[in-house]
Image (tube, rainbow, N blue to C red):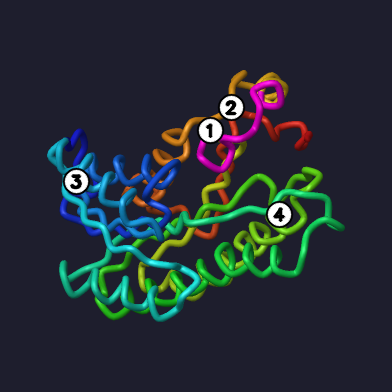
């Protein structure tokens, strides 16, 4: 399965790894030679991805985890280090959305999105950074943000706020951990064909594709490959950045 060896024998945690961008990234990490620890809430999906990677000659294992549970996140990182003796890379990709006019959203909607997209990522970062510092090898961490953090799409008040928080979060963290050789970045997707967008009718996606410089919406691999690149030595001087990957949709300001 390995087509490159930029992450040979590195250990990578990928959350939200059972489908979409997380699955694509997990496959890409494995192709780079990494041992991939697959995390998420749905064990059957994680096990299917682990089997897919193993069948292609890669190395992966599933550790089901609810990222909204700090104790579960701590156990994920601890178990990864216990099994493999290291943690080099993390892709904190698990996320949820809420799409509706603000008066139709509820406090429960707000809390659900923030619990996963903000507190869950903060919890992952806290435990991943602690492990990387303790191990003393440096490391690279990428979170999934969104172009919604800097653009504007009606109906995404909560989701956009959660991703804006991630963009703000990594800047002070990059300063905190840079002296230990740990890099922290975000990848900010445009509209991507994932389970999260599976219910969007094609007639709504077509205008989005037409507005993008590259004339299409994204595929999970478009994001997964950039997340992996940010964790390789090729991106060794990149930290504290939110890298937009949207096919040129946002060049003249987001429409939607």
Q: Are marks 3 and 4 in contact (CB under 8 Å)?
A: no
Between disc 3 and disc 4, the foreground one is 4
Query: What residue did someone put label 4 on?
Result: 160
- C-beta proximity under 8 Å, tags 3 and 2: no
Q: Verify whether residue 195 appears in magenta.
A: yes
Query: Looking at the image, do the residues carrying marks 2 and 1 touch, with CB atoms under 8 Å apart?
Result: yes
Instruction: Answer with the quarter of the image where residue 109 lies.
Output: bottom right
Considering every residue shown, the one lying at the far right of the view is 103
Measured along the vertical axis of the image, is residue 205 above or below residue 44? above
Which mark is nearer the camera, 3 or 1? 1
Q: Residue at x 37, y 51 (%)?
A: 17
Taking the spot 59% from the left edge, 38% from the top edge, the residue there is 197
- Spatial CA distance of label 3 from label 2 is 29 Å
CA gap between label 3 and label 4 equals: 34 Å
In which quadrant of the rendered image does the C terminus lie?
top right
Query: Is 71 left or right of 101, judged from the image as shown?
Result: left
Q: Which residue is mark 3?
A: 33
């Amino acid at each position: 399965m390995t087509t490159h060896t930029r992450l040979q024998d590195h250990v990578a945690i990928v959350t939200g790894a059972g489908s979409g961008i997380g699955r694509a990234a997990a496959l890409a990490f494995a192709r780079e030679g990494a041992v991939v620890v697959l995390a998420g809430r749905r064990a059957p999906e994680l096990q299917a991805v682990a089997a897919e990677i193993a069948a292609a000659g890669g190395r992966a294992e599933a550790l089901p985890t609810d990222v909204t549970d700090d104790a579960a996140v701590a156990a994920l990182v601890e178990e990864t280090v216990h099994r493999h003796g290291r943690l080099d890379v993390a892709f904190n990709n698990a996320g949820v959305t809420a799409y509706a006019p603000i008066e139709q959203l509820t406090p429960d909607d707000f809390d659900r999105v923030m619990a996963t997209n903000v507190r869950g990522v903060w919890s992952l970062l806290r435990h991943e950074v602690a492990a990387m510092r303790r191990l003393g090898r440096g490391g690279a961490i990428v979170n999934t943000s969104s172009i919604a953090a800097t653009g504007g799409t009606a109906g995404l008040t909560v989701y956009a706020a959660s991703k804006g928080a991630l963009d703000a979060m990594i800047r002070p963290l990059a300063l905190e951990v840079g002296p230990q050789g740990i890099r922290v970045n975000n990848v900010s997707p445009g509209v991507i064909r994932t389970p999260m967008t599976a219910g969007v009718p094609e007639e709504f996606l077509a205008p989005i594709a037409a507005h993008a410089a590259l004339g299409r919406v994204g595929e999970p691999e478009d994001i997964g490959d950039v997340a992996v690149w940010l964790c390789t030595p090729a991106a060794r001087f990149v930290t504290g950045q939110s890298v937009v990957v949207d096919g040129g949709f946002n060049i003249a300001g987001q429409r939607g």
